[in-house]
Image (tube, helix red, strand yellow):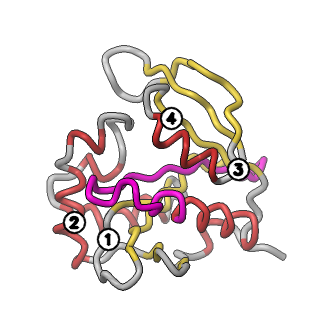
């Protein structure tokens, strides 16, 4: 029998990346990530890490509150051998009744274009379908986010809707593409 997504906090790894629990030592990279306008220009305004000025508090609340309530599971994305994170991988929006979850990711600019996002997403999908009871994985991207669309396509996601209005916390609706894997 496969486990539930929120049974534990996994550590996932490949030859290229490790997806792991965030720790206080990750605060400098988290602060750099959260402060980057370029990283967050294609992302919702209400992401968990953006709600805190103190990343130490964010890490504690992430696992004590957010994970415990089964709202979100966020893992640090660490390039293998570097010992520090370069981004976040997130599982969110669990619909346990239909075994569905959404996924997302965000990386520091210096990590763009190195295959890290694609490998992190591959690990997420393999984990979800291989070890958990999840049967449906979805994602959303702003229409303008061509790089993220390519990452999804490389990992077997299909665009199921184009140009859908969604509430991402901006003054007007965000025009997004919906993806399914």
Residue plotted at (24% across, 55% down): 33
The magenta stretch is: 96-119
Mark with earlier residue (3, 1): 1
Residue plotted at (66% across, 61% down): 125
- Residue 76, quarter of the rendered image: bottom left
How far is the residue under mark 2 from the one under mark 3?
A: 29 Å
Residue plotted at (49% across, 61% down): 73
The residue identified by callout 3 is 156
Q: Nearer the viewer, mark 3 or mark 1?
A: 3
The residue identified by callout 1 is 85
Mark with earlier residue (4, 2): 2
Q: Is residue 131 above or below residue 37?
A: below
Residue plotted at (56% across, 59% down): 121
Judged left or right of residue 3, residue 47 is: left
Tell me whether the residue at label 2 lies in contact with that at label 3, contact meaning CB atoms closer than 8 angstroms: no
Residue furthest to the right in view is: 1
Judged left or right of residue 127, residue 113 is: left
Judged left or right of residue 60, residue 132 is: right
Q: Nearer the viewer, mark 4 or mark 3?
A: 3
Q: Is residue 155 above or below residue 56?
A: above
Residue 68 x, y percent position in the rendering: 49, 65
Choose between 24 and 15: the one closer to the eye. 15
Residue 83 x, y percent position in the rendering: 30, 83
Tell me whether the residue at label 1 lies in contact with that at label 2, contact meaning CB atoms closer than 8 angstroms: yes
Mark 1 secondary-structure assignment? loop
* Magenta span contains residue 111: yes
How far is the residue under mark 4 from the one under mark 3?
A: 15 Å
Disc sitting over residue 29 in the figure: 2
* Magenta span contains residue 92: no
Disc sitting over residue 141 in the figure: 4
């Amino acid at each position: 029998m496969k486990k539930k997504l929120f049974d534990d906090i996994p550590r996932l790894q490949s030859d290229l990346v490790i997806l792991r629990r965030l720790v206080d030592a990750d605060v400098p990279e988290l602060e750099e990530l959260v402060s980057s306008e370029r990283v967050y220009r294609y992302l919702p305004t209400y992401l968990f890490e953006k709600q805190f000025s103190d990343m130490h508090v964010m890490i504690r609340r992430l696992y004590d509150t957010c994970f415990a309530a089964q709202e979100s599971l966020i893992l640090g994305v660490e390039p293998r051998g570097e010992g520090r994170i370069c981004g976040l991988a997130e599982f969110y929006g669990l619909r346990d009744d239909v075994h569905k979850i959404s996924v997302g990711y965000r990386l520091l600019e210096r990590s763009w274009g190195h295959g890290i996002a694609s490998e992190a997403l591959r690990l997420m999908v393999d984990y979800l379908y291989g070890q958990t009871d999840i049967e449906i994985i979805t994602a959303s991207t702003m229409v303008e986010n061509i790089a993220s669309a390519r990452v999804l396509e490389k990992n077997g996601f299909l665009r199921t809707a184009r140009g859908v209005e969604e509430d991402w916390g901006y003054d007007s609706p965000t025009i997004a593409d919906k993806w399914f894997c």
